[in-house]
Image: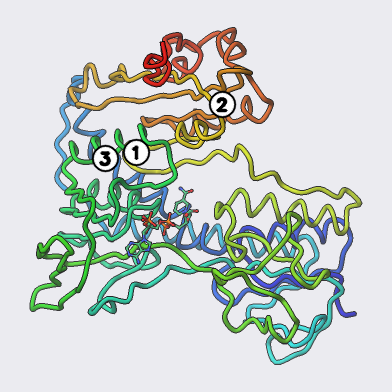
Amino acid sequence: MDFDLFVIGGGSAGVRCGRISAGHGARVAVAESRFWGGTCVNVGCVPKKLMVQAAEYGALAEDARGFGWDIAVRGHDWAALAERRNAEIARLAGIYRKLLEGAGATVFEAHARLVSPHTVEVDGKRVTAKHIVIATGGAPVRPTFPGAEHCLVSDDLFTLKRRPERVVLLGGGYIACEFAGILHGLGAKVHQLYRGRLFLRGFDEDIREALAEEMRAAGIDLRFDSDAVRVEKVRRGFIVHTTDRRMLEADAVFAAVGRKPNVAGLGLEAAGVAITEGGAIAVDEAGRTSVPHIHALGDVTDRLNLTPVATAQGHALADTLFGAKPRTVSLENVPTGIFTIPPIGTVGLSEEAAAKRGPVDVYLARFRPLRHTISGRDRKTLMKLVVDRETQRVLGAHMLGEDAPEIIQGIAIALVMGATKQDFDRTIGVHPSAAEEFVTMRQKRPDPLAEAAE
Ligand code: NDP
């Protein structure tokens, strides 16, 4: 065999798996055909977060006036932001490649494809490997209605030369909600259409409702039970025709209607690697495919599509295969942040999911954060704990408000350790902070079911 490990895909999962395996002494090759660092670094988490931060400054500058600052906001230079963001992304992508080379891995900047269970064709060569890892990630789904070819997808935000003045966003997932905050914050008129009753399906309902309120209060035109049926190109931009018979004018229409695993052109059949009905690579808990020496990690397996999950899976597999430390990654109590404005931080079960398992106590706090008592901005923070009534174990913690993703990271440790409500209660708060509310919530929300029973 030419290599102990051949990794197809140089994103979060692939780079971590390759680098750690090489560190364990394995002979490693990694192939990447588009960009080192994958979606997260190049067209996902990192540039997105920089755009969110850019979007927040406008409102922060306004808020500063309440604190006595004499600030006038004259506008935003999209091109200047794009230039600095792109420079940082190029630097990071370079670091990803260097990390691999520094660890002693061979890198290929080319498409790789399986031609047999142990053979990969890359850059016009055939190489053999004892283990193969597929970590090719995912790509945006494109809608199919008439005129869908006029829609942009999330990747395109990062190549736009100027700010679109009028934007229609399709979808109610992470990406559509985050893009709404970015584009609105940078000065566009934003319409967001979601086909269902309430966006962010699967997240805690109180949080979803509160976010919708905040976004509407900020001036985003948020429409539920509404979807695009056709996009028409007109002289100046586009017209989006909707299921509720509206016609929305736009300079840019973004479709953020999900992502699909990148499995095309990988030669999966040649190697005998099975895929699921949904088109993802089928794997067990350890990432093993239908071919035992071929593993798949990250978004191409379409389980919990989050960068830190992918990197953890890559690390665990490297330790298992070459570090004599076999382990898998638990997908329970994985915290996540949604970088909407304001953001969400969440870990564990929503109230709705927890209630399906048994009776729960719910603690909820909604308050105006200290900053906004002076800024004058009408914004509320929502914090919520979902507690198993019998064991008093905290099953879910959810927050909508400034710094929520930062705060939820620490709370996630408590949940992973199995903390009870009493553990939260005996923890002293950090004052004055929003975070302290998580350890001072004493008032249970009345349970309508229990009251009816009494
Ligand atoms: P999601 O799967 O989160 O959301 C897709 C949205 O599109 C849903 O609201 C869905 O509605 C809707 N939708 C799906 N199909 C159609 C259709 N045919 N017509 C109209 N609407 C449709 O996908 P995203 O693209 O937002 O994000 C992809 C993944 O990337 C996320 O699941 C997440 O794992 C990851 N991500 C994580 C981020 C973070 O950690 N902050 C940020 C961005 C992405 P419905 O609910 O009714 O099915």
Secondary-structure class at tag 1: helix
For label 2, the crowd category at 10 Å Cα-Cα, with few meaning under 14, some 14 to 19 and many 20 or more, is many
Residue at (28%, 25%) from the top-left corner?
380
Q: Quadrant of the C terminus?
A: top left
For the residue pair 37 and 207, the one nearer the viewer reads as 207
Dot 3, how many residues are within 10 Å of its Cα: few (below 14), some (14-19), or many (20+)?
A: many
Amino acid at the residue labelled 1: Arg
Marks 3 and 1, how far apart at CA: 6 Å
Identity of the residue drawn at 37% across and 18% down: 365
Using the rendered view, name the quadrant where residue 136 is placed: bottom right
Which residue is under mark 1? 208
Give yes or no for contact between labels 2 and 1 (Cβ–Cβ under 8 Å): no
Q: Are marks 3 and 1 in contact (CB under 8 Å)?
A: yes
The residues tagged by marks 2 and 3 sit, at their Cα atoms, a distance apart of 24 Å
Residue 268 versus residue 179: which sits nearer the camera?
268
Q: What residue type is disc 2 on?
A: Ile
Ligand 1 resides in the quarter of the picture at bottom left
- Left or right of 380: which side holds 405? right
Which label sits in the foreground, 2 or 1? 1
Q: Residue under circle 2?
A: 411
171 relative to 329, above or below: below
As displayed, is residue 223 above or below residue 336?
below
Check disc 3 and give the amino acid type. Answer: Ala
Q: Which residue is mark 3?
A: 212
Q: Horizontal and vertical percent for residue 320?
A: 84, 54
Residue 121 located left or right of residue 3: left
Disc 1 Cβ-to-ligand 1 distance below 8 Å: no
Rendered view: 4 above or below 219: below
